[in-house]
Amino acid sequence: MRNIRKIAGVILSAMLLGGLPSLAWTAAATLPQTIDSGPGAMSWTVTNFGGTDINGVCDGLSDGMAIDDATSANGAVNAFDTAYQVYIDDQIFIAPDPVDRSANVITAGPIPAGAPNLQATVEYLFSDRVQAARIRVIFENASGNPIDTRVDIPVNFGSDANTAINATSSGDQIFGINDRWLVTSDGVPAVAPVNSTVFFGPDNPAEKPTATTQTVCEDDKMSTEGAGVSFNVTIPANSTRSLMFFAGLGDIEGLDNTVAGAIANVMMFDDPATIDNSLVDDLSGTEWEETLNWRYIRADAIGIGDGKGGSNGCTVQGSRAADPLFPVLLAGLSLLFFYRRRLHKR
């Protein structure tokens, strides 16, 4: 009997350590929230005061969900002066109170957005491993007809008047409509965090920006200290569709804050298969297929386990419940307890 207890204890420990699904806590929270997630000194601040006044100027008082600021891994501060607001048909997304907060994810919505029967959810995920965040805007069309809507995503960098474009995906230093990403800083060497901004994916996705801008809100004025894109999207009848963006700070990988490091590592977004797992592993294949500005690629077409990314959302590698050892361990434990009960009956 003692041996049976020992064996059962070993199996149960293995299940708890490696076989059971990881259960992340989720709680209701009121904005602003500061999320300490990522390497080194990283933190991100999410606010609901990223909106504009009646003159269309950010004032730090008007409602609107945004990433208000961030600190990079090496401790550099002032990454943003409000960023990743979501405008739907010219109306800013205002987070309801409360939002859902887990260890490193803030989810707001769904709430009515523009057209009747259209709802929107905004989700900010902050990597626990690299200097990066993922922003998703999720639309649900509950009507029997397709819905067309315009989405604007402005990003104000904290590099202020010294903002310089150091690189773009097209290979120059000019931000244009075909640039999937850009790297910006306040100089070389950088003082404020270097920003890597990723607006859409490679391989001709279903939706790409229809317009770009470098004029965004800053405090009590408009400035050319950022970058923004506009999308004209269609959400089919009785369907869900989304847009997905990524924000990188510093070198993205590692703890440094250099322009060269950012340019080298932002290229992970040139292929969905090489995006760091911490930014995409929670996405299902269906969620990838529903993402309009990224092209869904089957797992067998990219080679699971290659590079940094691995799953590309086609398989949920981050879920321990999918571990093939889990059912074996569970079955073994069940047999042991069954055998123990038989011994008691004798």
Image (tube, rainbow, N blue to C red):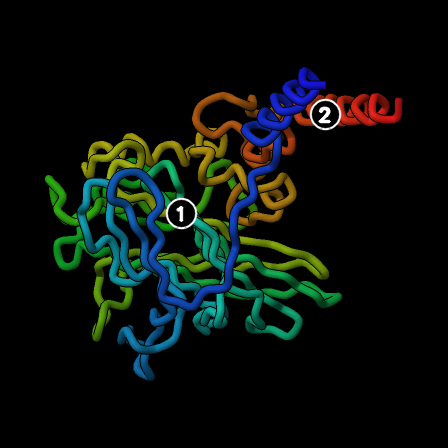
Whole-percent x, y for residue 183 in the image: 27, 43
Whole-percent x, y for residue 343 in the image: 83, 21
Compare residues 190 and 256 and report the one nearer the observer.
256
Residue that lies at the very extreme toward the top in this rendered image: 3
Question: Is residue 166 rendered to the left or right of residue 329?
Answer: left
Q: Secondary structure at mark 1?
A: strand
Which amino acid type is shown beneath numbered disc 2?
Leu
The circle on residue 203 is none
Whole-percent x, y for residue 298 in the image: 62, 31
Q: Residue at x 39, y 67 (%)?
A: 31
User: Which quadrant is the C terminus positioned in?
Assistant: top right
Q: Which residue is mark 2?
A: 333
Q: Residue at x 22, y 71 (%)?
A: 219
Q: Which residue is mark 1?
A: 126
Q: Quadrant of residue 312?
A: top right
Q: Earlier along the polypeptide chain: callout 2 or callout 1?
A: 1
Q: How many dots with numbers?
A: 2
Is residue 279 something one can see in this rendering? yes
Is residue 315 something one can see in this rendering? no
Instruction: Decide: is 284 above or below 242.
Output: above
Compare residues 251 and 206 and report the one nearer the observer.
251
Question: Is residue 110 rendered to the left or right of residue 7?
Answer: left
Q: Residues within 10 Å of mark 2 (few under 14, many from 20)?
A: some
Q: Quadrant of residue 138?
A: bottom right
Q: Residue at x 24, y 32 (%)?
A: 261
Instruction: Decide: is 163 above or below 203.
Output: below
Disc number lying in front (2 or 1)? 2
User: Which quadrant is the N terminus positioned in?
Assistant: top right
